[in-house]
Image (cartoon, rainbow, N blue to C red):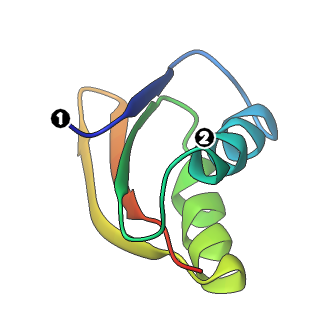
Amino acid sequence: MEPEIDLKGMNCPIPVLRTKKALREIDVGETLRIYATDPSTVNDMNMLCKTAGHELVDRKEADGVFTYVIKRGQ
């Protein structure tokens, strides 16, 4: 089972900061599932992956909750 973090109700920059911390705690190649409600996370998670070398494997939105799956890069 992949690790996950619940960031619902938190606003920028907290979701990105907590995601960075959680990614450091998993091994390269593992995935992390993130739940967030802040719409700015759509751009933030894309930028995080591009700048840090991670892969955004999946992104969904349902009922105001954004779900991301990020695969840790180097």
Q: Quadrant of residue 50?
A: bottom right
7 or 25: nearer the viewer:
25
Q: Say which residue label 1 marks.
A: 1
Q: Residue at x 54, y 43 (%)?
A: 39
Q: CA distance from mark 1 to mark 2?
A: 15 Å
Q: Residue at x 47, y 27 (%)?
A: 5
Q: Say which residue label 2 marks.
A: 22
Q: Residue at x 72, y 28 (%)?
A: 11
- Is residue 9 positioned above or below 40 on the image? above
Classify residue 20 as left or right of residue 9: right
Give neighbour class at mark 2: few <14, some 14-19, many 20+ (Cα, 10 Å): some
Residue lying furthest top: 9
41 or 52: nearer the viewer:
52
Query: Which quarter of the rendering shows the N terminus?
Result: top left
Amino acid residing under circle 2: Ala
Sequence-wise, the earlier of marks 1 and 2 is: 1
Amino acid residing under circle 1: Met
Where residue 2 sits in the image (x, y, percent)?
A: 26, 40
Where residue 28 sits in the image (x, y, percent)?
A: 47, 69
Query: Which quarter of the rendering shows the C terminus?
Result: bottom right
Classify residue 20 as left or right of residue 63: right
Where residue 71 sits in the image (x, y, percent)?
A: 39, 66
Q: Quadrant of residue 64?
A: top left
